Image (cartoon, helix red, strand yellow):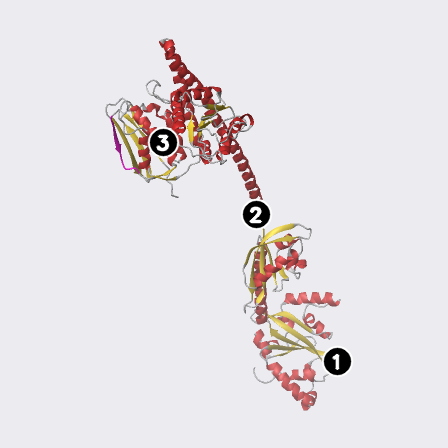
Amino acid sequence: MAGGPPNTPILQLAVGRSTHDGFSSISAETFAEVQQGEAVLEAGALQNAIFNSANFSSIATDARGVIQIFNVGAERMLGYSAADVVNKITPADISDPLEVITRAKTLSLELATAITPGFEALVFKASRGIEDIYELTYIRKDGSRFPAIVSVTALRDAQNAIIGYLLIGTDNTARQAVEEERTKLDQRLRDQQFYTRSLIESNIDALMTTDPQGIITDVNKQMEALTGSTRDELIGAPFKDCFTDPERAERGLRMMLSGSKVSDYELTVRARDGKETVVSYNATTFHDRARRLLGVFAAARDITERRKAEETIRHLNADLELRVNERTAQLKAANQELEAFSYSVSHDLRTPLRAIDGFSQVVLSKFGEQLPEDGRRYLQTIRNGAQKMGELIDDLLTFARLSRQELNKRPVNTGILVDSALQELGFPWQDRKVELRIGALVTSSGDSILLKQVWLNLLSNALKYTRNREHAVLEIGCTTTKGVDTFFVRDNGTGFDMRYADKLFGVFQRYHRAEDYEGTGVGLAIVQRIVHRHGGRVWAEAAVDVGATFYFTLEKDTTI
Amino acid sequence: MNEPNYIEILLVEDNPQDLELTMLALREANPLSHIHVARDGAEALDFIFCEGQSAGRLITEMPKVIFLDLKLPKIDGLEVLKRIKGDVRTSSIPIVVLTSSREQRDVVESYALGVNSYIVKPVNFERFNVAVRNVGYYWQFLNQPPKIAD
């Protein structure tokens, strides 16, 4: 079938002047006439080209629609040979009948004329001289379908009467596929945009982009909420207008454009209704593929809450400081009162005691001879009482002073401290036999005056409670466990019952009877207080009639 | 008190019992001492600087020692100490603080002001007696004061 024009008569139809409706009646004469003209030659070449094109289905019908020409393209596309269809069917027979019906209905409505669903529906517009190109599904001989774009032209004779129709169709499958693909791509693009958008919108920060001049190019909903302006109002406006301090905003933008990073840049947004929000900006520039600067991407986080929290903390701190100051002042006042009290006790309480003791003594020395034995003894008892009270007052004052006295911490040579305490206690003792065993004593850190008091009290206790021993042994030493130095004073004296060990360190707590061992009951309380003030611990181990050991630790001072 | 032409000891004490006990101790040390008693700080300063009741006295006739209590009416002992030690005419007079106060700040302050001795009055009369006697004896008889140039 390939090659020349498949059907000569159609050429007549196309250009001939036949007055007949059907080409069957076209005369040879007319044909010859046509062939003689130059236009005819040209037309012939054109027609050849058209009819031989395998890519266009060219179907020509008579006025009633019966197919007269069915070209190579049509054969290829539709699977029919020309012989199958020519003079047998109309193009409506190879079109999707439902589409034909639909088209008839649509056209009927559009043109307000009843149009029969059939060939008429395919060519009605063309028959009225209206250019008509439409999509239509053609059905192949094997029943398969394909979309086609059909262009319909009415063929007219010299009197302009319609003698047939030319339907030129192209297979639209590829284009439709492309279109479908494009639709898919469009959809994907829309999805992508939606995704991007939703990312921007779902961000908790108020986001915006500006161009390099600081003109807003995009914002998210949070930015709208923050500024109280709509997206349309914001886009195209200078970004700095959103803030209470536009100069500062502008500086931020310039910093960024000059390459500096802008982070946690605080600005106050003023909304349309005047509401101000403190925000912290983090911004970065963004570029296209060619690294051309496109603009700035800025994210603002509302830090009003944070600011409030900070403000609250500041208030709380200030409040706390105030209260601490008040409390400190109160403590200072209390301390001063206590000091005044101690001072008064120290002064005023001792004066009458001195009078009691002094005048008792004066009576004894001046008039002792005239007094009976009992009288002298009573006066002596009065004196003892006064003196004992004097000691109590002194010890109490010492004890009270320990709490408020500032610690003067220094490295302390324990050996020297112990030696000087022993000297103060009258070493070497002439009137009794005391064996001293002094071990290695590490240097400690603390207030040497107070630590000496600790040694004095512990050593004088040891001496006191060994005084009935023929051979008194005092052991002074130091052990170190897990980095903690423990000092101890051990004696072979009367010791005590461990059941009462917890009472030892209380003020005025005494284990022994006053007539057996003198004392005020403050010595160990003083020891405990000094040790505690040095961050240490004090304890004792003892057995009745065997002896006692007193231990104490001091806090290691790493600063020395 | 007897007032000879020349006073050896100025005793500044407001408490009558302490005064009497101190006098007993001083007399025991030297029954013939010329002692002048001032009962408050103002009286003590008047005596030393020859003002008020002591206007007729000569400032160059300095006592050999002043026993000074710290807690005194009108002008307290530290102030008295400060004025006497702060004046070139009187600064060489030995001053012994004789007080009930063991407070460190009193001790420190007294020495800062130039006190010559600081004695805490013990409750025990014997010890009190010994302290007063010894100190009185030392400043009266052993200490060599500078010669006064007018």
**Chain ID of residue with mark 1:** A
Q: Mark 2 sits on what residue?
A: A306
Label 2: state its secondary structure: helix
Amino acid on which the number 3 mark rests in the picture: Val
Q: Which residues are magenta?
A: A433-441
Judge if badges 2 and 1 mark residues of a common chain.
Answer: yes
Q: Is residue A82 visible?
A: yes
**Chain ID of residue with mark 2:** A
**Chain ID of residue with mark 3:** A
Q: Mark 1 sits on what residue?
A: A160
Q: Which mark is residue B130?
A: none
Residue A453 highlighted magenta (yes or no): no
Which label's residue is closer to the chain start, 2 or 3? 2
Quarter of the image where one finds residue A200: bottom right
Q: Which of these two is toward me, A13 or A394? A: A394
Label 1: state its secondary structure: loop
Q: Position of residue A556 (x, y in %)?
A: 37, 40
Q: Position of residue A141 (x, y in %)?
A: 57, 72
Q: Which of these two is toward me, B96 or A298? A: B96
Amino acid on which the number 2 mark rests in the picture: Arg
Q: CA distance from mark 2 to mark 3?
A: 54 Å
| Residues at marks 2 and 1 touching, judged by CB atoms closer than 8 Å | no
Q: Which mark is residue A454?
A: 3
Quarter of the image where one finds residue A437: top left
Amino acid on which the number 1 mark rests in the picture: Asn
Which label's residue is closer to the chain start, 2 or 1? 1
In the rendered view, would you say A234 is above or below B125? below
Q: CA distance from mark 3 to mark 1?
A: 138 Å
Q: Position of residue A485 (x, y in %)?
A: 32, 37
Label 3: state its secondary structure: helix
Tell which tag, 2 or 3, sits nearer the viewer: 3
